[in-house]
Image (cartoon, rainbow, N blue to C red):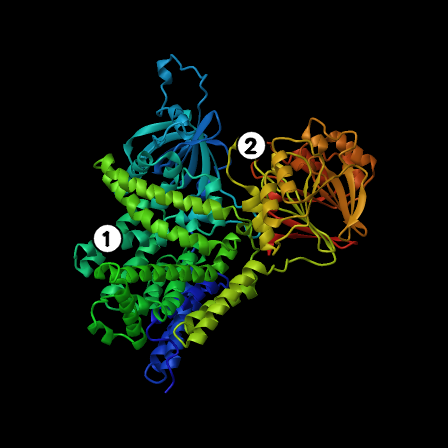
Amino acid sequence: MLRSAIPTSQPLLWAALAFSAGLWTGARAWRPPSWWVLAIIAFVLAARWFLKRRTCAAQILALGAWFLLGAFFIQIRSLPPSNSQLNSLADDRELTLTARVIRAGYLRSAGTNSVREPIDIETETVESNGSIIPVHAGVRLTIYERTQAQESPSNDDSSTPTLPSRRDAADTISGSGNDVPFSPLTYGTRLRLRAKLHPPRNFRNPGAFDYEGYLRDNGISLLGSARAENVERLPGFAGSRIELWRTRIHSSIVAQIHRLWPARQAALMDAVVLGEEAFLRAGTRVEFQRSGTYHILVVSGMNLSILAFAIFWTLRQFRLDPALAAISTVIVSFAYAFVVGVGPPVWRAALMLAIYLGARLLYRGRNMLNAIGAAALGILLLDPRALFGASFQLTFLAVFIIAAIGAPLLERSTVPYSRGLRLLRSAGYDLRLPPEIAQFRLDIRLVAGRLARFIPPRIALTAPAFLLRIAIGFFDLMFISAVMQAGLALPMAYWFHRATTLGMPANMAVVPLTELLMPAAAAAVGLAYFSRMLAMPAARLSGLALDGITGTIHWLGGAKLADLRVAMPSAATILAALGALGLAALLARRHRLLACAGLVAVTSVALWIAFVPTAPRLRGGILEITAIDVGQGDSLLVVTPGRRIMLIDAGGLPLWMHSDFDIGEQVVSPYLWSRGIEHLDIVVITHPHADHLGGMPSAIANFHPGELWLSTDQPTRELSPILLQAKQAGMTLRLRREGEEFDYGGAHFHVLAPGRDLAGAMRANDDCMAATVGIGNTAALLAGDVEPVAERRIIAQHPQAILLKVAHHGSARVTSSDLLSSLRPRFAVISVGVRNVYGHPRREVLERLESAGVKTYRTDFTGAVSFYLNGESLTPDVALSH
C-alpha cells in the first residue's frame, strides 16, 4: 500500500500552500477562466475516482485542484475599476465637491505658521464648469490652515469661519500641551468644499512601493488638498452608525491615553495599544525597524495575542469554565480588533486566535498546523491578493515557524521538564512521567531537602522550582526568538532590505516588557473612565515597561551592526530559504540529529542573506547611465565599464514641504537594492539644493561609499550635515572643478563646471557640477542644474555627447539652441516630477529638442530609464516596459 502523500493531520495546511502557489501562478500566467474551471472539474473527478484505489494519487490530484482554484480566484478577482469620470477632472483644477468624511484625522503641524489635517472623504457630487455630476469615489484629502499670530480677525459678520479654528491646536502639536488635537471633522460629517485633486502616482522604478495599490486597497482613488476656509460643514449625517461609534470609541481611548501618559510616551502608547501612528516621529519608526522590533509599534498578532492571553488567564483564575473563557476571549479580541480599525492584519490575527482556541476546545492542540492552514485558507478565499502583501506573509510565516519548528523542538526538550515542575509534592505523579523527568523531580526534592535545613520546607521546595521555571522560560524565549529571526530573514530582506541581526537580543528584552505593558495599559485605560487615581498605578507600571522598551531599542538601535542593509534576494536565495524552512518543519519531529540539521539549514540561509553580498545585476564592459525617477529632483546611477558604481545626486524634497518622506531611503535605495547593489564606490553632489542632496544621507548610510565628490564645500544648511556624516564615515572628499580630466573604472570624465573663478558663488546653481562621461566614441553630458552663464562656458569648451541630461529639469533658461547645435546629442533625458509647481519641462525646451532631432525621455512619463553606451552606439531601456 502506498503511503499517504499528504500528512492526514495537516490537510488544510497543504491545501493552503497549494492554493497560495496557484494564486502566485495565476497572477503571472493569465489563461481564460473557462480553462481553469475545466481543469478544476477534471482534477476533482480524477481525485474522486482514485480515492478508493490509490490514496496517494487522489491526494496529489486534490492539491492540484486547490492549485487551479487559486489561479482561477486571482484572475476573476480583478482590481476595482477606477472612476474614470472623476479621474478626468483630477488635473489640479479647483473643483467644488459635496462629500462625507469616511476617516477622520488629527491636526498636525505643517511648519511654524500652518497646520494640516489629513482625512478621507467619499464624494457625492462634483461641480465643474457649472455642471453638477454625481460621482462616488474615495479621496485622501489634506486640509491646510494658516496659524499666523499676526492675522487680525475680521469685523465683518458675514465672514464667519465655516469650521472651528485650528489655531489653538498649533501649540498642542508643538508640544506645549498634552491634549489631543482632535479634528472638528468626524466620521459621517457632510461637507461642501473647493479642492484640487490629482491621481496618486507610484515612483516608477523597479522595487518601488506600490502606493497606488495601497490606496486602492483602502478605497482611495484620488489625492487632494484644500484650504480650511474653503471647507463648509453641511447639516446631516451620512454613513454607518456602527462605524461612527467605532471612531468615537477609538478617539476616546486616544484621549485617555494622552491624559494618562506624557506626550512622549503617549505617542508610543497610541501605536502599541491602538495602532495609531499619527503622533509618531519618523526617527522613532527607524529605531524600531533597525532593532528588528517594529512589530511592537503596529497592532500585530503578537500584541493581540498578549492581550488575549492576559484575558484568558484572568478568567481562568476566577475558575471560569475553559469553554466560556475561550469564547469570552475571542469576543473581546474581535471587539478589540474592531476598535483598533487598522485593517486586515489585526483581523487576521483575531481569526487565527479564534481558530487556535477552538482547536484547544476540540482537544486538537497538537494539530495547530492544520488550524493555521484553515485560517490562511479562509483569509485567502476572502481576499486572494492578501498573499502578495508583507503583512500576511510575515504573520503567516511567523506563526508557521513557531508551530512547525519552534514548538515541536521545545516539546522534545524543555516542555517535559516544565511539566515535571508541577505537583512536586506528589510522588504518584512521578509514575506518569518518563524516567528522566521522574529523576529530575527526585533531584529537585533532594536539593529541597538540603535547603530545608536553613529555610522553611515549603519554601525550600518551591524556590528551586520557581527559579527553574524562570530559567526554562528564558531559554524558550531566547530559542523562539532566534528561530524566528532566522526564519524571517527572507521576508525582512525582501520587503524591508534589513538583516535584523539584533532582533534576538532586542526581542528577548522587548517581548517580556510588552507582555507586561499590554495588559497594564489596557487596565489603565479602562480604569481611567471611572477614576484617574485608580488608573495611575497601572499607568505607571506600563510607563516603566515602555521606558524599558524604548531604552533597549535606543541602545541596540544605535549599534553599527543595526545598520546592516541587504539587497533584493535572488531567485535562488528565495528558493533556498523556503526549502530550508520546509526541511526544518519536516525534520522537527524526527531524530534529534535530523532536527538539528533542519535548524542548521535555516540558520545558514539566514546568515547567507545577511552577510554574503548579492551579485549586482549589471552589464559588463559598457557604460550605464540611469535616470532614477525621484519626482522633481535629480538622481543618476552611473556604472562604468569596470563595474564601478556611482550615484550622482539622490533627489529630495524642499524644506518648505515639511515632509518626513525620505527620497533616499524610500525611493533611491529600493531601486539600487532591486538591482542587487549593496555598495557604492562614489557619491556625487552636483550642488547644494534639497532636490539633489536631500536623499544623500540615507544613500551614504545604506551603501557606505568610499568617496564624495563635490562642486563646493561651502557650508550650507543642507550640505553641512552631509559633510559631517561623510567625515565620520571616513569618506574621501574631492572638489571637482572645470578643466579636470581623468579616467575612472574604464570611463573618461571631463569636468566642465563650475569654473574655478565661480566656486563659492552666492547662487547654488552657479556652483553646479557638470561633466561629460564617456567610453570610446560615445559620451553623455550630465548638466545638473547649470545656469546660462555656466552653459555658455560649457559651449565654449566644445564637448561632444550622444546623450544629454537636460539641465534644471527642463527650465526655459537653459538647453539653448546653441548648446544643442554644438553638442549634437541624439538622446536626452529630463528628470522631472509629475504636475510640478514650476511647470517643468517648459514647452519651448521640448520644442528646441524636437527641432534638433533629439529623442527625449522624461522620468515623469517613463519612470527610470537607462542608457547603455558601448563606445560606438547608445541603447535606451525603460525599466518598467519589460
Labels 1 and 2: the sequence-earlier one: 1
Q: Identify the residue at image location x=27%, y=32%.
A: 236
In the image: residue 679, left or right of residue 290: right
Residue indicated by mark 2: 655
Q: Amino acid at mark 1?
A: Ile
Q: Amino acid at mark 2?
A: Leu
Q: Residues within 10 Å of mark 2 (few under 14, many from 20)?
A: few
Element under disc 2: helix
Res 205 visible: no
Q: Is residue 141 above or below residue 65?
A: above
Asked whether 99 or 811 is in front, the reply is 811
Q: Quadrant of the N terminus?
A: bottom left
Q: Identify the residue at image location x=50%, y=60%.
A: 490
Asked whether 293 or 346 is in front, the reply is 293
Which label sits on residue 301? none
What is the x, y in percent for residue 836? Answer: 57, 35
Q: Identify the residue at image location x=41%, y=26%.
A: 171
Which label sits on residue 331? 1
What is the x, y in percent for residue 468? Answer: 32, 62
Q: CA distance from mark 1 to mark 2?
A: 48 Å
Res 564 visible: yes
